[in-house]
Every structure is written in structure tokens, then in C-alpha cells.
Amino acid sequence: MARRRIGDLLFEAGLLTTEQLEAALEIQKRTRERLGDILIDRGFITEKQLIEVLEFQLGIPHVSLARQKLDPAILALVPEALASRYLVLPLRKERNKLIVAMADPLDYYAIDDLRMSTGFQIEPAIAAKDEIRLFIERVYSMKGSLEVAVQAAGAADQQEIAEPELVNDDSPVVRLVNQILAQSVKLRASDVHFDPAADGFRVRLRIDGTMRTEQTLPKHMQSVVSARLKIMANLNIAEHRLPQDGRFRFSPSGRDVDVRMATLPTVHGEKIVLRILDQSIGVQKIDQLGFTKDNLQMFRNMLAAQNGLLLITGPTGSGKTSTLYAGLGERSTPEVNVIAIEDPVEYQLAGVNQVPVNVGTGLTFAKGLRSILRQDPDVIMVGEIRDQETAEIATRAALTGHLVLSTLHTNDAVATIARLVDMGIEPFLVASSLIGVIAQRLVRTVCSECRHTYFPVPVEQELLAAHGVTGSHFTAGRGCSVCGGTGYRGRVAIHEILRMDDHVRQLILHGATENEIREHVAQSGFRTLMRDGLQKAGDGRTSLAEVIRVASRDS
């Protein structure tokens, strides 16, 4: 590679003026900083422009580390100190060449040091500085803890594990588990899966609703990691044949995080799933849930009712509980007696009496709901309607002067009516008690760091036209270090709201089909999940592809 300077390349590309280059070089003489960092920090260029110049003018490939499968054996070729000093990360080797991601691929001192340290010819690729720094922190620190924990655990069976190794905060196994949990919280994971396999123990994270494999532990680490997690959740470490449930609190970096844990016996050992509930995030208000202006007003109007049944529907993981909590927060005032029964209580709400379901002692949703009705409630929240008995009590409570909020698993708002009837609730009870249904899904929002605008393809244009949606800010994400290469970061809800009117009540009383009810509400301006999602895509909040992925089955 011809030795050319970054400043000259940027000047030739028309991205720098002579004055800017000279000013940056003068700063470099005083501070010894990298020229690229100086130019970016002073706002002369963006990191994206720097990467594009190096990629197109010198042919240095640009890589996204989030899309690379990093081999521990390759990482071991470059010491952590060297990687941190030069901001480099080894990716793979090809014969006598080592491909290395570098923040500054024209740093020839770094290339020479890497060549002498590894014995390989160095072929640079360019990656974002922050992305390299993030992955160095992630892979090297985790790798060090894992190596020590593996050595400490050896190939011992769980019966031979020394108790101090599982409870001592300084033991390698405890440090490894804590590091996995802390990293999961940092990456905003909602769930952590420890999946046993024939040849390893995978750690997978669910981030923004999608799963990704974070690392694979050696098979003989499975027993000690499982035992440590069981101790944290106060479970029986000797029981491997039956499922167990527990919870514990974890505080990485001073943040309070509640963790719900569930074990499940499989042919390769126990699978463990942790649900992370970050208490520092707290309960959202209803105007933070992504409702459009019209839908938000409808929701508020239904919450203001003195009595009736209001249902939030959708599959598991669609944010129903968050919407319920937000609704309770809207109604919880000193003048109102609010009681909730949940399984389990996820977040504690000020001013709300929260009752946890305990099946072991016989406190089910139905039994708890009967007791709540004797506590003079104004507003009742039932975490989930799972059976006919709970549904009947909830509907009758809604008819006797109580506002009842709950959730139900259905595909859309209209299907909720048929679901209640199928559960054994008489149509006249459904028509009389139900005041509205909110169906919702969660779609991923486009990453603000790597988003770009584009014009919809013909198929997408047809879909938009069919739903009467227009927009000019359709976006998608390219994938970067901030979003882990997915192009998305965070999620927003899409909704459809069925508000009961006299015509719908008459249709229910006369046994109308779902299609007949759909035809009526469609003529009344009913906004479907698909339409709400497409409108949010038109506003640039999510992508058309994401809306189609999530809502197409329900449109």
C-alpha cells in the first residue's frame, strides 16, 4: 500500500480546505492526537466521510463488527493492551495474512507493531472508532473472565462444586455470571437465554424483540453457571428434573434491576431464561407509548369511564403490561381506590394496591379478583384473563360499577369479541360490559445513527396506497456499532382501537361474525394495526419492512 496521508486524501476529495488541514496539522504537532480524530472532533469532517474516502479512494474495506463472527483463537493473537493502544481488532486469518479492523488503517506504526507481534502480514479494514472500542471492551474483558472461570471449574460435575465458588463475589464463576448480566443490561436486553447443547452452553440475548447469540461457553461450564444462577434466585441447585421459578435483584453500575428466572429440563441439561426488568426505566406515561393523537384521545376517554371492561390484546412481548401500567398511572389519584392483581408484579406503582398471584397457596386470578371486589375498589387491573371463571368475574365487575383493565391473547381487536364468547361469556355480557379493545404490537425504530431515506419500491407503494397512507420520510438503517448492525434501536408500539358503539353492541347481541363486525368498523374509520404502522413508517419512526414483518398477518 502506498503511504499516503489521511489529510491529503481528504483534501483531494474536496472535504477539507487548506486552512482546515493546516490548522489540524498544527494541533497534531502539539497534542500528538491522530489527525482523523482531530478533524472529526473539530467538526471539519464526519467519521462517515472519513470511512468513505478510505474505502473508495484506497480500496480499504469497511466492516461492521456487529456482523462479524469473532473467533476467540484469532482474538488471542493480539494482546488486549495492543488492541486498546491502537484501536484494532483481529477478525480472521487467511494463510499468512491477518485481517484487522482498524480505526486508522493508515497508522503504519500500528501495522508494523501488529506484524511483529503476530508474525502475520497485516491487511487492514476500517471500522468506526466507537464500535472498535465497544467490542474491545466486550470481547477481551469477557474472554479474560471466561478463561479464569473455565480453569477454576475444570471438568468437575455439579456435585463436586465447592460452595464458596458459587457464593464468593471474588470467585471466577461469580464474576463471569455478573459480567454476563451487566453486559446484557448494557445492551438493553429484555431476556437472557442460557441454552444447553450437546457441545456447549450458548448465551443468547433478546434485544428489541429479536434474538442474537452473544457467546458460547464450554460445555463443562454449564453446571457451575446454572448452579450460580439458581443460588442467586434462591432455587434448589440439586433439582434438575423439574422446572423452577425464582427472582433476584441485580445492581450493575448502581442501577436496580429485577430479574425473573425460569428453568426448564431439556435433553442436554437445564435451559435457563432470565427476564430483565430495569427498575431505573420506570413506568411510562400513556403519551410516551407511541399512540397517534386520535388514538391517545380515545384511550384517555375510555380510561375516564366510571365502569366497564377495557382490554389490551396482543401476543406475548407486545407491550401489553406497559400499556396497562400507563393506564393505571393515569387513573391513580388520591380520590380513587386502585387495586391490581398480577402474575408477577413487575413494577411497583405508587398509589396502587398490587396483589401477586400465588398458585401454590391457591391465590389465582379468579380467587384474588373475588377478594378485591370486597375491598371497595374503583379501578381494578387484572394482569391477564386466562380462563372462563376470571373472564366472568371481570365482566360482571365491570357491570357493577367498576372500571376493569386487563389483557387477553388475541390477534386483533375485533377477534377479542369472539374470544370472549368462545371462553363461555354470554354475548349480552360482552356487549354490556366491554367499552373498548386496544390491540397492539411492537415494531423496531430505525437507528438514528445510521438511518437513511429512500423511495418505496412498487410493492411498498401499492401497500401504502391500499391503506390510504402517504409519507415522504421513509427510512431504513444501514447497521452500525450503536445498533449492533441491525439498523434498529428501540421499539415503538402500533395500535388499533375498537371502541364500542350501539351498532357494534347490536351486532354482538345478534351473533354477528367477525367479518360482519369488521365491515361495520371499517366504514366508521377504524384504523388497523397495518395502517397505524405504515403511518409511523411514513413519519420516519420505523421502516416499511419492519411494519410488514410485524403487522402483515393481522392486516
Image (cartoon, grey):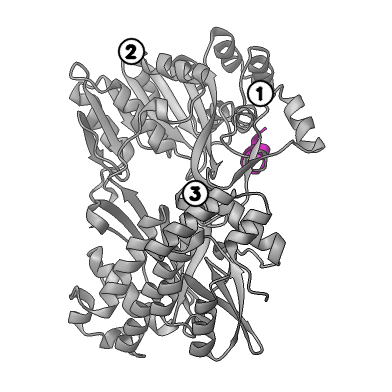
Q: Amino acid at mark 3?
A: Asp
For residue 68, the mark is none
- Which of discs 3 and 1 lies nearer the camera? The answer is 3
Residue picked out by circle 1: 513
Q: Is residue 390 above or below residue 345?
A: above
Q: Viewer-proximal residue, 170 or 88?
A: 88
Please state which of the two labelled residues, at mark 2 or mark 1, is closer to the viewer. 2
Q: CA distance from mark 3 to mark 1?
A: 36 Å
Q: Earlier in the sequence, mark 2 or mark 1?
A: 2
Magenta segment, principal secondary structure? helix
The mark that comes first in sequence, 3 or 2, is 3
Q: Is residue 248 visible?
A: no
| First-in-chain label (3 vs 1) | 3
x and y percentages locating residue 35 in the rendered image: 49, 61
The residue shown at (64%, 19%) is 517
Q: Which mark is residue 208?
A: 3
